[in-house]
Image (cartoon, rainbow, N blue to C red):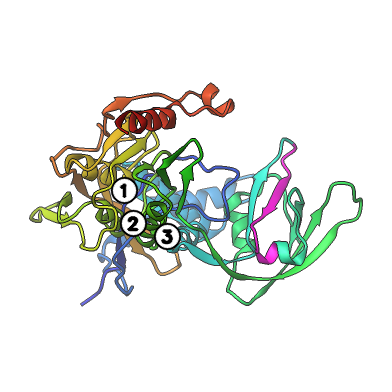
Amino acid sequence: MAKWPARKTIVLVFLGIIALTSAFGAGFGVAQVVPLSALPIARNDSARLDTFWQVWRLVERDFLGTLPSNQARVYGAIHGSLATLEDPYTVFVEPQSHQREKEDLQGSFGGIGVTMRRNAQGDLVLSPMPDSPAIRTGVLDGDVLVTVDSKPISATLSFDDIAALVRGKVGTKVAISVRRSGSEALLSFTITREVINTPSAVYHILDNAPQIGYIAISRFTEHSGEEVQKAAQELEQKGARQLILDLRDNGGGLLTAAIDVSSQFMNDGVVLYEQEKGKPEQTFRTKPGGVALDMPLIILVNHNTASASEIVAGALRDNNRAILIGDQTYGKGSVQHIYDLGDGSSLHVTAAEWFTPNRHQLTGHGLIPDVVVSRSNDDIAAGRDPQLDCAIAYWQGKS
């Protein structure tokens, strides 16, 4: 009996936005891995592709320009055929991007420890992370990446392409050259790749409100639950009596991580319901051992709060554990299964729907905050955060 490719359950939304200042890796998410074997193929499949090959024989004969590789043709055909489903979340992910996706969900990868951004001239500007292999070798903030293992870094090279060059197996070496302000000669560095951790949560006591602890989650990875647990414990030890959980611009991640995070704030409650095609409804509940079960909680959300983030926000509000402040959320409750394919690519297939504990449908609706407060582009440019200010004022009014 033939086996299906490895399947995982995806809990993310493709927002189509990649921050230029992001590290080599941004969080997407999956769960449940099954070993890959082979797909059963119907005997008449090849006959159905006769027109496809007829078209390409004519293109090969007549086309004036450079022909794409056979692999590029196959990938293009897959992308095009999936587009006929008119579902933005059923997609084919090519090997390089899928590798980044897996590393991002693990919360770590083999690399040199830099973030990157494009300047107005299209140069790739580096910023080494603290205590990273890059900074210990001599890379400085503002250095412009010129080559990686002798390959030129052009303005048209994508971030995925550059990440694939820089990342690699822990313990291997990568040679880079950089251009530094004030120096005409290129500087060369050979850097040994190390495990680069990319925490999904940051936290601190608010300077202007020492009784309030602030936790922001950028994505839901394998370590998000333990990171939030540690954050809540340390904030309480430092005097926090109320918490603000910031899920703005968090596009999703692992379902297991969403459950783990919810479990830190809620005891024995429903996190979500899942309805899969042709199967009984499945209920997901919290796990025991939460460390902030009684701390008052506000959750900040915006239009980019999506998927797993909406699950957490909806679960905590429906269970009367939190209020929501901010903008209406993205509205994605559809569930994607991920199949790992033999060449390192993957197929994401929409296969189920999620509902909050009060059976609110997320897809197409999102969550409307209890207190609606917007943050404009002008606010962001000026360093203002009326949503956070509203949350602080709410807790201070309760003190």
Q: Which circle marks residue 105 in the picture? A: 3
- Please tell me how crowded label 2 is: few (under 14), some (14-19), or many (20+) other residues with Cα within 10 Å: many
Q: Position of residue 183 (x, y in %)?
A: 90, 51
Placement of the N terminus among the 4 image quadrants: bottom left
Q: Is residue 369 above or below residue 71?
A: above
Residue 343 lies, in percent from the top left, at 45, 68
Mark 3 neighbour density, 10 Å: few (under 14) some (14–19) many (20 or more) = many
Q: Are marks 2 and 3 in contact (CB under 8 Å)?
A: yes
Helix, strand or loop at mark 1: helix
Q: CA distance from mark 2 to mark 3?
A: 7 Å
Q: Position of residue 286 (x, y in %)?
A: 20, 57
Magenta residues, as a range?
121-134
What residue lies at 26% left-to-right and 33% top-to-bottom?
367
Residue 254 marker: 2
Residue 362 is left or right of residue 54, and the answer is left
Q: Is residue 127 magenta?
A: yes
Q: Is residue 223 above or below residue 359?
A: below
Q: Examine the rendered structure and indicate whether residue 171 appears above or below residue 251.
A: below
Residue 308 image label: 1
Seen as rendered, the residue at the extreme left is 280
Task: Say whether residue 339 is left or right of residue 156.
Answer: left
Q: CA distance from mark 3 to mark 1?
A: 13 Å
Question: Which quarter shows the C terminus?
Answer: top left
Q: Is residue 86 visible?
A: no
Please tell me how many numbered marks the rendered image carries. 3
Q: Residue type at mark 2?
A: Leu
Q: Quadrant of residue 234?
A: bottom left
Q: Whole-percent x and y of residue 147?
A: 76, 58
Q: Nearer the viewer, residue 254 or 3?
A: 254
Q: Work out whether mark 2 precedes mark 1 in sequence or the reverse, and give the earlier one.
A: 2
Residue drawn at (68%, 51%) of the image: 127
